[in-house]
Image (cartoon, rainbow, N blue to C red):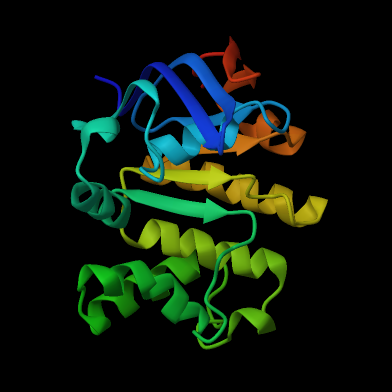
Amino acid sequence: MPLITLADVSKTYRHGSLEVPALANFSLAVEAGEFTVLAGPSGSGKTTVLNLVGGLDRPSAGTVTVGTLEIGGAPAKILADYRLRRVGFIFQSYNLIPVLTAAENAEFTLMLQGVPRPQRRRRVIGLFAELGIDGLEERRPGDLSGGQQQRVAIARALAAEPDVILADEPTANLDSRTAEELLDLMRDLNLRRGVTFLFSSHDDRVIGRARRVVRLEDGRLAGDTGQRP
């Protein structure tokens, strides 16, 4: 049974009297452990898919199911718990809290879950070492490079050990070398830990490292390479 299933999903956004279609009869199944990128130009529907899978939005038609949770019919409280415990998010703008240290940012989701401080600090210290940013725990985001900030964001996403990590244009604000290093790192995490990654990107560096490329055009499925070794 797939970890993620979108079945005949449509999504229309309304701005006053204007209706803007974002997805149209889109279907996709993602197995646990995949490293998959949603590829396509801006406005093709990539971010909408991530928002639906992440429980940040609900479909206008069709069903979005992650594990046994059907997003469209889930109460708000269930969705909030789902976002807290089962999904990790990585954003192009990092979304770190400026007044917190790097370690505190990485621990933030665990803190919201009620994990005791010693336990969450041990987990984060281990992740920082694994991600090559050990020694930076007490620095604030403003004292870190873009690549270091994104590694902190990856640690935050991994810390809660979610079912899936969603990454929306994760290399958009990084130089080529840093972007490639981070992509190799995330692919290594996928292979070693079996973490499921679902990206959105129009960056060839991301697309070239994905094991599966799902292409969207105008909110519709335009191609799917299937899972590669």
Q: Foreground: 208 or 201? A: 201
Q: Say which quarter of the image contains residue 84.
A: bottom left
Is residue 88 in sight in this rendering? yes
Q: Answer above or below: position of 105 versus 212.
A: below
Please give the name of the residue rendered at 72% of the width and 47% of the height, measured from the top-left corner: 180
Side of 134 relative to 87 (left or right): right
Is residue 228 in sight in this rendering? no
* Residue found at the far right of this picture: 176
Please give the name of the residue rendered at 40% of the width and 52% of the height, measured from the top-left corner: 88
Side of 176 relative to 156 (left or right): right
Side of 111 relative to 16 (left or right): left
Q: Foreground: 220 or 155? A: 220
Q: Foreground: 208 or 2? A: 2
Q: Say which quarter of the image contains residue 199.
A: top right
Picture coordinates of residue 25 (x, y %)?
Answer: 47, 12
Q: How many marks?
A: 0
Picture coordinates of residue 125 (x, y %)?
Answer: 41, 75
Picture coordinates of residue 104 (x, y %)?
Answer: 42, 80
Quadrant assignment for the N terminus? top left
Q: Answer above or below: position of 99 versus 168.
A: below
Q: Answer above or below: position of 99 versus 85.
A: below
Q: Say which quarter of the image contains residue 148.
A: bottom right
Picture coordinates of residue 89 (x, y %)?
Answer: 46, 52
Please give the name of the residue rendered at 38% of the width and 46% of the height, measured from the top-left corner: 193
Side of 137 relative to 31 (left or right): right
Please give the name of the residue rendered at 41% of the width and 40% of the height, measured from the top-left corner: 57
